[in-house]
Image (cartoon, grey):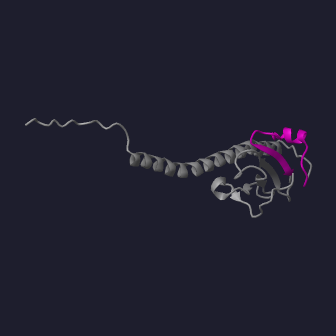
């Protein structure tokens, strides 16, 4: 009797079920990763716009301490006055305007309208920094979703301020 030799054949590739499992795992990861990435991009866009308006707040305080008082209330201040207190009207991530310069009884308001980015943060969304006339404290309000805004409080009204 002849002996039968068992020939072992090496596996030549992946089975269909193995490939389907890999595709399913990639699909699940993509379903989780894409919304997380979109939130990350929106948060970074908001942070960039907030970073652009922060020097305006500092320049505003320096101007007040130096005795400079832009004399204009309840209207948009011209570009020369904005430049004198450190505000640039056009930035890569926002358009900043001073909509109200207050006195001892009126709050001062700096507004940045966010431009570009995803629909979650792009215009007509805004960041508004308000300086209390009596306290001198700055408060931040925005109409961007709270999960994207960080420490900036969500405004009650969803319409951007004029200016």
Q: Count the marks: how many?
A: 0
Compared to 7, does 41 lie above or below?
below
Q: Position of residue 53 (x, y in %)?
A: 75, 45
Compared to 155, does 14 lie above or below?
above
Q: Is residue 20 left or right of residue 43?
A: left
Q: Position of residue 45 (x, y in %)?
A: 68, 45
Identify the residue shown where x is 85% and y is 58%: 106
Whether residue 107 appears in this view of the structure is yes
Q: Is residue 65 left or right of residue 150?
A: right
Using the image as rendered, state which of residue 100 and residue 127 is in the foreground: 127
Using the image as rendered, state which of residue 77 and residue 108 is in the foreground: 77
Asked if residue 90 lies in the magenta stretch, the reply is yes
Residue lying furthest bottom = 156
Considering the image in quadrants, where does the N terminus appear? top left
Q: Quadrant of residue 55?
A: top right
Using the image as rendered, state which of residue 14 and residue 25 is in the foreground: 14
Q: Which residues are magenta?
A: 74-100
Q: Position of residue 84 (x, y in %)?
A: 86, 38
Using the image as rendered, state which of residue 2 and residue 14 is in the foreground: 2
Asked if residue 61 lies in the magenta stretch, the reply is no
Identify the residue shown where x is 70% and y is 60%: 154
Whether residue 150 appears in this view of the structure is no
Q: Position of residue 25 (x, y in %)?
A: 46, 49
Residue lying furthest front = 1
Q: Is residue 23 left or right of residue 135?
A: left
């Amino acid at each position: 009797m002849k002996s039968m030799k068992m020939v072992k054949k090496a596996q030549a590739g992946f089975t269909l079920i193995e490939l389907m499992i890999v595709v399913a795992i990639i699909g699940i990861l993509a379903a989780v990763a894409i919304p997380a990435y979109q939130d990350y991009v929106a948060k970074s866009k908001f942070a960039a716009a907030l970073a652009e308006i922060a020097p305006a707040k500092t320049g505003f305080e320096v101007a007040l301490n130096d005795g400079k008082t832009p004399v204009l209330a309840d209207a948009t201040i011209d570009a020369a006055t904005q430049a004198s207190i450190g505000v640039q009207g056009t930035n890569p991530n926002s358009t900043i305007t001073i909509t109200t310069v207050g006195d001892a009884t009126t709050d001062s308001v700096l507004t940045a309208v966010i431009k570009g980015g995803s629909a979650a943060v792009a215009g007509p969304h805004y960041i508004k920094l308000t300086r209390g006339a009596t306290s001198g404290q700055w408060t931040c309000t925005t109409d961007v979703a709270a999960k994207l805004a960080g420490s900036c409080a969500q405004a009650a009204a969803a319409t951007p301020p004029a200016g």
